[in-house]
Image (tube, grey):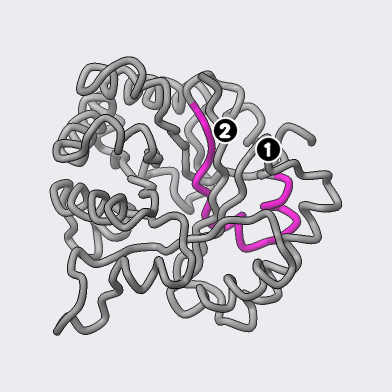
Amino acid sequence: MARKPILAGNWKMNMDHLEANHLVTSLGAALADLGYDPEKSEAVVIPPFTDIRTVQTVIDADSLPIAYGAQDVSTHDEGAYTGDISTGMLTKLGCAYVVVGHSERREYHGESNELIGEKAKKILDAGMLPIICCGEALEVRKEGKHVEFVLGQIDAMLANLTAEEVAKSVIAYEPIWAIGTGETATADDAQEVCGAIRVRVGELFDEETAEAVRIQYGGSVKSGNVKEIMGKPDVDGALVGGASLKADEFAKIVCFDLI
């Protein structure tokens, strides 16, 4: 089964709406200059909530071949949940994806695997697709328990999803020690864990689901290393942080097969 690579740029808490306008416009131009073919890979931007309407307007106005989404979502539909954003709000803005379980949400907001799984279910029920994050800290990697640790996350987060829902989802493996540090897991490191995740999905559901689910690698991805990482059989994309804030650099990552 052919899985279309998905290259998603997580802007984190960067870019006001004016900067977002400029970045998406520049990204569209950079992709066109490189001869980007949206049939071969999927370009996605994940801006802060305050930028989503601006991003939507630019993409729609210029018919840019870029999808967009949000960095988190509430499990609640509405009500007295100050600061939360519902799936209904995101679907009205045309969001296609929502990132859940990023290590920064886990660390700074105490999010559990069970809560992340609940959010993923909520996103799917709303007609959007979750990008479900997992990954280990440096001490876990040094102990050689990284595969075991990540598979434990997968077991808990996918527990209440159906095979059909998992097949549509995206799983992002991001070793915490490689996020924003300049340190990057080798392509073989990425393949080891992404391959193990695919095997576990097959064990939890079935082989068809395992072959369908797209698995990204994230952690200091840049144009200089993306091609090697994407060359691995179980790596179907990248969740990109800092490099996605530079239009030319992110365009090269999206067009990894052309550079």
What range is drawn magenta here? Answer: 235-252
Residue 32 appears left or right of 132: right
- Quadrant where the image shows the C terminus: top right
246 inside magenta stretch: yes
Residue 29 appears left or right of 38: right
Q: Taking 221 as reference, is 57 above or below it?
A: below
Give me the residue at 75% from left, 66% from top.
26
Residue 132 appears left or right of 59: left
Q: Secondary structure at mark 2?
A: loop
Cα distance between the residues tagged 2 and 1: 8 Å
Disc sitting over residue 4 in the figure: 2
Give me the residue at 25% from left, 64% from top.
108
What amino acid is found at the position of numbered circle 1 in the picture? Glu
Residue sitting nearer the eye, 180 or 66: 66
Give me the residue at 66% from left, 76% from top.
21
Disc sitting over residue 207 in the figure: none
Which x, y percent locates residue 198?
Answer: 35, 22
Give me the residue at 54% from left, 50% from top.
8
The residue that mark 1 highlights is 39
What amino acid is found at the position of numbered circle 2 in the picture? Lys
Residue sitting nearer the eye, 41 or 241: 41
Which x, y percent locates residue 40?
Answer: 68, 35
Residue 245 lies in quadrant: bottom right
Callout 1 crowding tier (Cα within 10 Å): few <14, some 14–19, many ≥20: few
Residue 208 lies in quadrant: top left
